[in-house]
Amino acid sequence: MTEAAKGSRAAGIPGLVRGLAATARTLARPTHTSEYPDAPPSLPPRSRGVIALLAENCTSCMLCARECPDWCIYIDSHKETVPATTPGGRDRQRNVLDRFAIDFSLCMYCGICVEVCPFDALFWSPEFEYAELDIRELLHERDRLGQWMATVPPPPALDERSADPAEVSALGKPARAPRAPRQAAAEEGQA
Amino acid sequence: MATVDLPLPRLGVGAETAPRPIKVVLNWGRRYSLWVFNFGLACCAIEFIAASMARHDFIRLGVIPFAPGPRQADLMVVSGTVTDKMAPAVRRLYDQMPEPKYVISFGACSNSGGPYWDSYCVTKGVDTVVPVDVYVPGCPPRPEALLQGIIKLQEKIASESLSSKGMRAKYGGHRAATAAEVTRPLVAPPTREVVGG
């Protein structure tokens, strides 16, 4: 469209009227201000507010602390010996989590710790209301991280045409044939 | 560089000895007319601007983003990465604000350096330069998180009882400025020059 054609189309209406028409249209439209403190905000799904910890799942493998680009995760743990459950068995060792803390004044909310956790101990929660008067309180210790678990939304539903999850498809499989008794196998070998 | 001591802030006799109900009224006035001065240094400033626009609109909470400069502002929001080169400017503009003044540190970078905590040129938190009242976590925080930080600051203002002693305690006993900052003459108004003559 050339400049002349533009001018001829708008020439009939004075600019003032066109401006008032725009004002009138805006006046008729409802405001889109979200009344935040009074009305809860509509957060997008998977929004990254705070990281919650399910301490029961944590094996203190340190993967999250090592992958964190900001080094804002602090983990302390010690080893405990679990006595053997069968006679003649071997004692096992397991890690016991002593301290798990995330420094939210440093955290860059990249979510690598949540991605990398092999035992699903870390989750995103959409909560964002934890501004503090003292910066030391932004270091959330284990119990505070655990309290965020209540705010973690349920995972999104699977796609309709997706394959069954591994747990479900395992149920449908036939049971494995029982192994031949060990003694009989040993006799066959001798024969 | 030679330094001079700036005068320490003080409260007027009337405000210092005012009875409790008067102080409540004064705090109520301070709380809901926070002229804000945005020290936007990085991407968090975009979220600050979003919070000032029509959807989040923090004028609802009495935060007014039309302060012409730090000399007319009550609240400074440091949003973004404070570099060591910028830190003196942050301090200087903070010094220019009238008492009582408040600072919100908005985002991980200004809280503690954030992703740049190991950098050679980034200040490890704006609280190493100016006293901070509220820390808003996030990278960047949501606009609602700023609104929540403002509400937290308003609660703090409502519960505080201002005194000269308390205001001076923020400075640790002295305010120093370089002599050049104080004695530099005013910038002369531009003179009309005849173009081409």
Image (cartoon, rainbow, N blue to C red):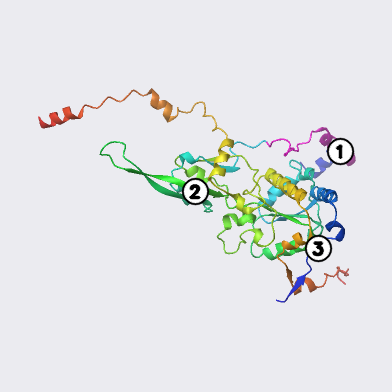
Quick check: marks 1 and 2 in contact, CB under 8 Å?
A: no
Q: Report the chain holding disc 2.
A: A
Residue density around tag 3, few if under 14, some if 14–19, many if 20 or more, within 10 Å: some
The residue at 54%/29% (across/down) is: A157
- Above or below, B99 against A146 in this view is below
- Tell me which residue sits at (80%, 46%) in the image: B62
Which residue is disc 3 drawn over? Answer: B10
User: For the residue labelled by badge 1, is the local secondary structure a helix, a strand or a loop?
Assistant: helix
What residue range appears in magenta? A13-41
Q: Circle 2 is placed at which residue position?
A: A99
Give percent across and percent down for residue B81.
64, 57
Q: Quadrant of residue A16?
A: top right
Between residue B103 and residue B72, name the one nearer to us.
B103
Residue annotated with mark 1: A18
Report, in whole angstroms, how far the alpha carbon at label 1 lies from the one at label 3: 55 Å
Question: Which structural element holds mark 3?
Answer: loop
**A82 and A186: which one is in front?**
A82
What residue type is disc 1 on?
Arg
The CA distance from mark 3 to mark 2 is 45 Å
The image shows residue A31 at horizontal and vertical percentages of 78, 36
Query: Label 1 vs label 2: CA separation?
Result: 66 Å
Looking at the rendered image, the quarter that the N terminus of chain A falls into is top right
Front residue (pair A172, B173): B173
